[in-house]
Image: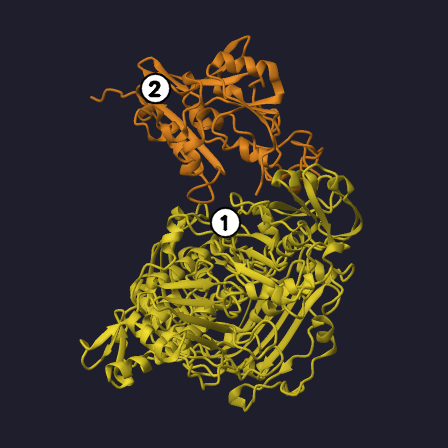
Chain colours: A orange, B yellow
Amino acid sequence: MMRLPLFEFRAPRTLEEAASILDGERANAMPLAGGTDLLPNMKRRQQVPRMLMSLRHIESMNCVALNDSGSRLGACLTLSEIAADRRFRNGLTALAQAASLVATPQIRNMATLGGNICLDTRCNYYDQSYEWRKSINFCLKKDGTTCWVAPGSSKCMAVSSTDTGPALMALGARVRLVSRSEEREVLLADLYNNDGIDYIKRRPDEILAEVSLDSLHGWKSTYWKLRRRGSFDFPVLSVAAAVRLRLLAVR
Amino acid sequence: MPNEEDPRVTRVGSPRANEDDLRVIGVPRRRVDARAKVTGQTRFADDIFLPRMAFCKLLRSPHPHARIRRIDTSRAVAHPGVYLVLTGKDVPIQYGILPVSQDEQALCVDHVRHVGDPVAAVIAREELTAFEALDLIDVDYEILTTISDPKEALATPEPRIHEYGEQGNIHKLVALEFGNVEEGFAEADEIFEDTFFFQGNTHLPIEQHASVAIKDQDGKLTIWSSTQTPHYLHRALAKVLEMPAAHIRVIATPNGGGFGGKSDPFNHEIVVAKAALILDRPVKICLTREEVFYCHRGRHPILMKFKTGVKKDGAITGMHLQTLIDGGAYGSYGVASTFYAGALQTTTYHVPRYRYQGCRTFTNKPPCGPKRGHGTPQPRFGQEVQLDKIAERLKIDPANLRLHIVESPNAVTANFFRLGTVNLSECIRRVVEASRWKDKFRKLSEGRGVGLACSAYLTGAGLPIYWNKMPHSGVQLKFDRSGGVSIFCGATEIGQGSDDVLAGIVAEVLGINPFDIRLFTGDTDLGPVDLGSYSSRVTLMAGNAALQAAERGKAIIAEGVAEKLEVPKERLSFADKRVFDSVAPEKGIPFEEAVCIAEARFGTIGTVGSYTPPKSPALYKGGGVGPSPTYSYSAAVVEVEVNPVTGWVTVPRIWIAHDIGRALNPTLARGQVEGSVYMGLGEALMEEQEFRRLPRKLSHALVHKFPSILEYKSPTSLDMPEVITELIEEPDPQGPFGAKEAGQGPLLPIMPAVANAVYDAVGVRIDEIPITPEKIMKALAEKKAGREPRFGPSHFPHINWPEALRVPPPWEGGDGNAVNDVPRRTRTVSKKEKVLTS
């Protein structure tokens, strides 16, 4: 079978502790939530962090706060929790639908909201084992010099496959990024870059701790996903929409 | 032990006059290995852990085609934790499943032929260490021209991928003609010419191949492996390791699915065996999913051209089939596959004159081989889609057309295959009725459609892989004083239920419960040879052997009991764990007491049974591929919904009727049918073993597009339609209790039935498998533009075919020999075959 490379493992209890570890390790460490994306990638040697820092033991990252003024979702909520929780209905339907359409039940039991937002970009030349990539002399995103999707391109063409991302963007979500020195909140729509390698504005020393949403009272939302089969598949195309209908008085 | 019978002459068929007597056979039952499977206790090869066990990883070629100039393993050998590094020179002897294509080496010595071809092995204390050490092996390659498909292979005779074969990169050419096909076409009212392409796909068993080898205390070798063919692996190991076969024990662990993908002897099996012998410690390998894609041996991509002449009523007057087959980098079963691709066209509908030309080429891709249906689903797809076109042009309902031309029971076909029971008409009638075909065909709203197709399949290959006159299957039974019965047989449980078949048959004959039986199967030391779980042969062949052994045991026990009860032995019945007077059932004794009486009378009781298929009338060269004791038949109706805007196909329902002879355990038989439907649907709609060629100016690479279960799309349970299965039971005289196969045949009609249904739904022909939304969109665009509403190949390339062997069919007085060849009975082995088999 495919084996993980050896790595050091840390499991901080607080966000402060986690931010401090990342600050010291910088690019050597990667935060680990459900591991459903990162661990297979490590087996394929797409990422080989020296240290994995688990976020699952940070209590604040597993919390949900829903009230009239809006909602705050901990980044370590699992996709199963989001899909099953009846509170994620009405205005948040798109999010619940997106979460329920990710991969398989087993993966959704482990995979987290934050992990799905930060999902590494995907490409059929990149999401391959070390040996496979060796036989194409690697690619621009990792260890090589050519983007095989567009050999003339200087930019990596790998794309995001997050399901919850579009849903949350339609809902106007913001994410809270925490590092040792600062805390900032950015609109999810602004989190991503149009580049397969430098695809996310989260810095290596930052933790995506929380997703926040304004009150969605009166909103309706939906998420549709086109995929090759009924389960266990990334989207070929996905569409999310959120609308608020104002009823005009009819005489 | 009374045994005057010639062991080679096997009694077959149903031993019971009155089938109402059956207590086990035909009763839906929990399979004997179900408990272990559902509680996770089945021990697969990768579940085996032994003290001091080392782990093996293989270094594989990153190049599709290259010469190995030099291998330097010194850095890997020096790596901490590495026990051993092997290269090709350590195991140089060539092997292969077929005697005519011994073209593989466990580790390539000087020539790599596809990305994934193994060149070295590292055996280390930990699997991770072995993996890391692979990168420390330095291989100097000289890159050769990449040959990526059959057309390139035809155009590129040099460099040769192999030094043997017909010429250049053509591995095998076949040309056979049964009757004068041109005369057949002259008699026809209409001639149809159609070209089809069937993309390659792979088996995708859930269990990856794994093997563990040890050197036993006495210096012998034992290997546990996920193999469907322990006997053939046994022979290959003896050859390559240059060890007496008697010193090698192969144990086929239960396979987590095989489907033909574990039927070859594999390089990793030989490597761990060699390493265990050298290191004197257990050595294990478990392939990654990607490596399973490199083992492959899956469905051959086939380009094919059908030319068929028909009368106005649909009767076929002649058929000419040409195939161009992408074999991949090695022979594997390919010679047989090439013949199979032309073999079964004659077994469903009466074809009075038939010509087959087949060409298999080598290419720089993982080798193709036998996948469920072995070589026959591709031409079956073409034949059944063409029949749909014929029916439309002749304005005959496709079901009625088929009913009109179905081949007769017990017929000998144009290519000299002797059929057994043929209930294809009944299969067609049942699915037509169940699906309400008459209300639906050409009558559903735009976007919805139904399609029908049929098939036939062998119930066991009539000949073994290597020439010999011995039985194809043997069973030994041991009768214990406790009343327990042990079955010893080489048959291999690959999930299909072969253990349950053996237990069911023996339990039925002896009147005991299948759960009272112990099974020792798939072990070359413990049980007599069974050739393996391939060609749908186990139920019939091992089943008949088990039946014979059980009947012999029953006779011995009856002899003893008759004396004791003072009842004529003919009057004794065996049922409900008792042996009793059938006229006065209260007069009887428990089965265990009956065994004791017989043991006291005759000594230790053990019996044997064996099975050899009947001789085939197909005596011409190549006639060894296709004959079978009997054939199964299937008919399917598939309903589809095609979205005309997106080309998306959904399948809400499938009706399938399968002519099984008799379902020994209907639960398992239905499982086999539904499993076939599932796999067929995957092939029809999404599965593709696709390769990626990078821009040639920049790279010679030729890689598997996505060797993973995620990206190699196969259906999930959510994609599975409702399947309405009907089993048609007319016991076949050749099968144990009349049973025929169910594991492969029901897959075959699914792909063409889907294609025919898509045509009924949106009026476009997709003459290519898989039928993807993109292809449907292209065909719909053609239709809109007023051109031929079709997607598929338009051209079959020119091939220099050899002169066909001309075999007059039975109705022209043929005797099964070719008129332009030396009669086979006196034919000497040709020089080429001698070289390859030596």
Chain identity of mark 1 = B
Residue at the (73%, 41%) spot, across then down: B76
Give the image location of residue B240, x and y in percent. Answer: 68, 62
Depth check, front residue: B703 or B84: B84
Depth check, front residue: B564 or B358: B564
Residue at the (63%, 80%) spot, across then down: B621
Q: Which mark is residue B140?
A: none
Q: What residue occupies the far front of the structure in this picture?
A: B600
Q: Which mark is residue B777?
A: 1
Depth check, front residue: B234 or B635: B234
The amino acid sitting under disc 1 is Met
Give the image location of residue B627, x and y in percent. Answer: 52, 77
Q: Which mark is residue A216?
A: 2
Give the image location of residue A62, x and y in percent. Answer: 40, 21
Depth check, front residue: B487 or B103: B487
On the question of residue B87 being in view, the answer is yes
Give the image location of residue B707, x and y in percent. Answer: 58, 46
